[in-house]
Amino acid sequence: MKVLAVLYNGFKAAIEEPRLLGTVENKLGMDKWLASRGHEFVVTSSKDGPKSDFEKHIVDAEVLITTPFHPGYLTRELMEKAKNLKICITAGVGSDHIDLNAAVDHKIQVLEVSGSNVTSVAEHAVMSMLLLVRNFVPAHEMIERGDWQVSDIARNAFDIEGKTIGTIGAGRIGYRIMQRLLPFNPKELLYYDYHEIPPEAESAVNCNRVGTVEELVSQCDIVTVNCPLHEGTRGMINDHLLSTFKPGAWLVNTARGAICDEHAVARALASGQLRGYAGDVWNVQPAPKDHPWRSMKNPLGGGNGMVPHYSGTTLDAQARYAAGTRSILQNYLDGKPQVHQNVIVGTGKYETTSYGIH
């Protein structure tokens, strides 16, 4: 069968560092294994437009492997052309680049390597909070320029201790973020999620659930976004919701860029309604050079902690999601049952509520 993988180019770095498994060059470490089983394995980074390798090969591929870090967007229209397609595997976590409703209709399975990135993303989210709250980026830029004016940095630098921090979404990543924040002695940890955390887990991190997103953001000094992207969360953080934030709050988004309205966030930061915004996810990836999140600033010239989408693709995470992708594919090839928590769409139905309640 044909297995098609859409990955990102690693170029020189991938040649020098073979542990960059999620690259075109290193092919998730699966090329020799698939060849030994007689399968065709096409690996490409060309994913956009009718002349792309993605659209060329999807028409006769049986297996599609994609990644959140360089997503191949599988639309309903493309599924209708993909007559042989039986299974989509996300090498990582987050399958919103696939039209999941169309996958249900076409009886195409969608699986991801659940849990492969949770530690990596939780650490990145906490790091992002720290660099915003401590005003780190402008301080470092000052040193690079050869300047030294402590007051210009300290006027907008704070401690995490004593702050109210809330997470939108309290699943594997959101909960781990709260675990990692607890030693910083925050004033309060809040969460909003349509699933309630078990009482013993709430007690372990001393967190409290709130009933609405508005109730959460109105109380928090720091808000972190940790929910999947689906119809109910796309564009959720817009001008209206941002107006209900505490003035001068910090916002961290390591979930999906399209959960936030990019122009609304830029306006809120420019006005000072947000003191800072950080994350690694963008509504379009790769982000265009003129994307407002590349250059937006708060009124004091700081508050931007944006980076490329890499929080869940550390070398440690790549080892986990490469192994998980191979395991899912091997189960499929051998006709064995899949690990239930990895299944987003089974044959003709959703197997999870993570992408909204169906």
Image (spheres, rainbow, N blue to C red):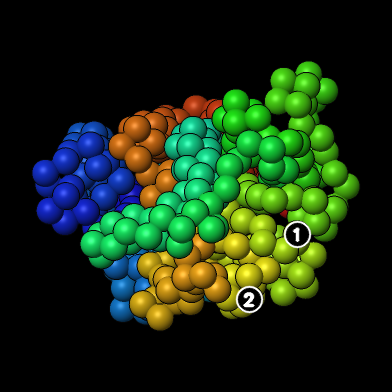
Residue 17 sits above or below residue 282 on the image: above
Q: Is residue 253 visible?
A: no
Which residue: 42% across, 66% down? 285
Could you tell whether 293 is left or right of 196 in the image? Answer: left
Q: Name the residue under label 2.
A: 271
Disc 1 versus disc 2: distance between alpha carbons? 13 Å
Q: Mark 1 points at which residue?
A: 246
**Residue 276, horizontal then vertical, whole percent:** 56, 61
* Residue nearer the viewer, 93 or 203: 203
Q: Is residue 311 above or below residue 298?
A: above
Image location (x, y in percent) of residue 176: 59, 32
Q: Name the quadrant containing residue 20.
A: top left
Residue shown at the point (83%, 38%) measured from the top left: 209
Q: What residue type is labelled 2?
A: Ser
Mark 2, secondary structure of its residue: helix
Mark identifier at residue 335: none
Of labels 1 and 2, earlier in sequence is 1
Q: Which residue is drawn at 18% across and 48% down?
A: 14
At label 1, the amino acid type is Lys
Residue 80 locus on image (x, y percent) = 53, 69
In the image, 319 versus 262, the foreground residue is 262
| Residue 39 x %, y % | 27, 44
For the residues bearing labels 1 and 2, Cβ distance under 8 angstroms:
no
Label count reads 2
* Secondary structure beneath label 1: loop
